[in-house]
Image (cartoon, helix red, strand yellow):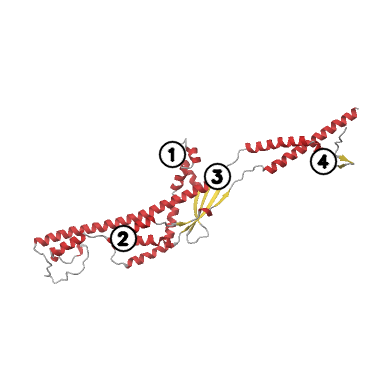
Amino acid sequence: MGKKTLIYKNDEIDIGKIFIILWNLKIKITLIALISFVIFVGYDNSRPKKPNVFKNTLTIKSAKENEFFILKSLQNEIVNVNKFKKDTLRENLTDVTNYNVKVLHRFIEELLDYQELVSVLKKNENIKKDISQLSEYDKQQKLYGYTKLFTVEKSPSETQNHEYTLRFTWQGDQGESIDILDQVLKLALMNLRASILKELEDNYKNEKEFIVNRDLRRIKYLLDQSELAKKLGIIRSVNKYNLDLSTNLDFSENNLAIPYYLRGSDAIDMEINLFKNRKYSELEDIENKISLLQKRDIEFVDYNIFLLDSKLQNVNNTLSLSLTILLSLIIGVVCAFIFNAFQSYQDTGKRRTN
């Protein structure tokens, strides 16, 4: 017996013997540790893992009031284009102080119709694969089911409703969830901008149509009055009623205090030519301003996608590399001591037999 394998000496553990055993069995320990490591890694990789779930939170605030000064001024200018009192424009401009808050509320309404979210999710590759085999009805039902993961709430600390908190929970890649949210917000902003500018254009067209039609009605009325004046032989104004015919009268023919043909066909024809040759310079000025506004970059709401708070909600319990190595070594050492004890028992049995 060249090697003594007992680890007890005088009922005490002999540390030196332990190291000798470990050294003598180093190959067996290494092999057992490697086998254990492979088993641990294989088991850990074969376990079904839950996909990561991220909860994204973003604060959306109203933009600064001066962002909308040009827009609101132009809206008021369109409204007042038919007004004779120009100071009305100055009175209406006070509305701009709350316009940024109204725009914020409209943006939130745009988000909560979920059309932008569904539009973005339709183009997501993972979702496209998931719903590819479904019917159109089931596809829509599945897509709108994702809207439950998307919520917008008024911030509890904000008393004046100038701030909202957007929450979006996403199962999958973190970068993908941020990208989806970024696309949804940009699309909602684009739709909001288009909606506001379209309203502006529609209001302008309505006002322009009203003015043009009013002038056409006026021309028709003047043509009738001119023809009547010519038939009566009234070429120049006749003031047999001793009235001031030079007084500026309302364009509405219903407000005339005297028969209009008494002004004479010459004066009426001149007025007709003025209406026909009218340039509508005020309307052209508004149209140019609308064109410039469409090219202007307006910050309708205030948010920063880079300040988005994204937190992992679930954690998959996986064995770390260091822990796997440590457990493998422990198993290797334990097996080595078991092997050593078994070998010592066999040696003792042989000695007794001899």
Q: Report which residue position mark 4 lands on.
A: 19
Residue at disc 1, secondary structure: helix
Q: CA distance from mark 4 to mark 2?
A: 97 Å
- Give the class, few, some or many, for how many residues have Cα within 10 Å of label 4's Cα (few <14, many ≥20): few
Between 174 and 23, the residue placed more toward the observer is 23
Which numbered disc, 4 or 2, marks the residue that appears first in the sequence? Answer: 4
From the top left corner, tell me how far across and down residue 43 is, in percent: 66, 36
Q: Which mark is residue 285?
A: 2
Which numbered disc, 3 or 1, marks the residue that appears first in the sequence? Answer: 1
- The amino acid at mark 1 is Tyr
302 sits left or right of 257 in the view: right
Which numbered disc, 1 or 4, marks the residue that appears first in the sequence? Answer: 4
94, above or below 45, in the image: below
Please identify, in this view, whether the residue under mark 3 or under mark 1 is nearer the observer: 3
- The amino acid at mark 4 is Phe
Which numbered disc, 2 or 3, marks the residue that appears first in the sequence? Answer: 3
Q: CA distance from mark 3 to mark 1?
A: 27 Å
Residue at disc 3, secondary structure: loop
> Are the residues flagged by discs 3 and 1 in contact, CB closer than 8 Å?
no
